[in-house]
Amino acid sequence: MINFLVESGFLERMDSNVAATALGSLLNNLYLDPYTANTYIRGLRARDETNDLGYTHLIVQSPEVPRLRVRRNEFDDYLELVLDNWDYLLIKPPISRDEIENGEFEDEELEDYLSTVKTAVMLLDWANEVSEDELYKNYDVGPGDLRVYSDLMDWLASAVARLAGALNMRRHEEMLNILRWRLTYGVRDELIELVVNLEGVGRARARALYNSGFRNIEDIANADPRAISVIRGFGDKLARSIVEQARKLISEGRVARAPTVNREDGVRQGYTRKRGSLLDYL
């Protein structure tokens, strides 16, 4: 165990003793077990940048994340998704690409791996604002399950981002800092500022605000509460509350701004829905 921790960079030998490295101390503060952290670091070092599927699939490698079972009629679809995104997956399957393409494997060899892929796809559906009803229909994941996943993503995505920062992997850190909020709140990039700052505003209300022209905290602070009260999901009381919150945040200089990052041309970030429940990253 000591050898593993030293080789992973979490401990260093000092004569006859050992001491935690800066990375090891961070690991302790993040409440990550060393095996999971080692997997995360190995994945981050595999590629300078990846797509949202690659990052999310890395995050769900933690044994803390409940994994979705892949049904037999879904097996080939998820296998195709793996092959389409092979270069972007930071943790590869336990067998080679040639073996998969040539059919030289038993399904049991890939069941566990594909369950992590399916879980990552579900979480990206959530982050892309797919409705809870559709998530339940496609993945048998209910509101209580989503709350568990949301809490886990807040912890684990943040932990991976901080590991990337400690290793001076700034590109990974930037991308993960955005994805963390999306996976936690179930929103696209443009809604992060609204859900992070305003109490009483979740993914549905944030989208309603954004679509009605209230796209940031300044827009809300300058609004007449009556203009917000008529938006679906709002009433007079909540409208007044979020306007007061926005004005207070601005006056106190406490507005949490959404992180931004320029995506490089070589990395696929968009997606289209495929076969009802799968994402095809194009």
Image (spheres, grey):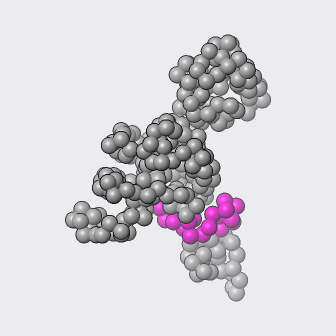
Image quadrant in which you'd find residue 48: bottom left
Q: Which residues are magenta?
A: 24-49
Residue plotted at (54% across, 62% down): 62
Locate residue 185: give its quadrant. top right
**Lateral position of residue 73 relative to residue 154, left or right:** left
Q: Position of residue 95 (x, y in %)?
A: 33, 69
Q: Is residue 57 above or below residue 174?
A: below
**Does the segment drawn in magenta span residue 40?**
yes
Q: Position of residue 127 (x, y in %)?
A: 50, 41
Does the segment drawn in magenta span residue 213?
no
Q: Magenta region's main secondary structure?
A: helix
Please identify the quadrant where the N terminus is shown.
bottom right
Asked if residue 186 is positioned above or below residue 173 in the image, the reply reads: above
The spot of residue 154 in percent (x, y) is: 62, 49
Which of 27 and 110 lies nearest the eye of the viewer? Answer: 110
In the figure, 188 relative to 58: above or below?
above
Q: Does the rendering let one see residue 268?
A: no
Residue 176 shows in the view: yes
Q: Position of residue 278 (x, y in %)?
A: 37, 46
Q: Residue at x 68, y 31 (%)?
A: 200
Q: Dividing the picture into quarters, in which one does residue 4 lie?
A: bottom right
Q: Of 247 and 262, which appears nearest the observer?
A: 247
Q: Residue at x 64, y 22 (%)?
A: 234
Residue at image location 69% in from the left, 79% down from the top: 18
Placement of the C terminus among the 4 image quadrants: top left
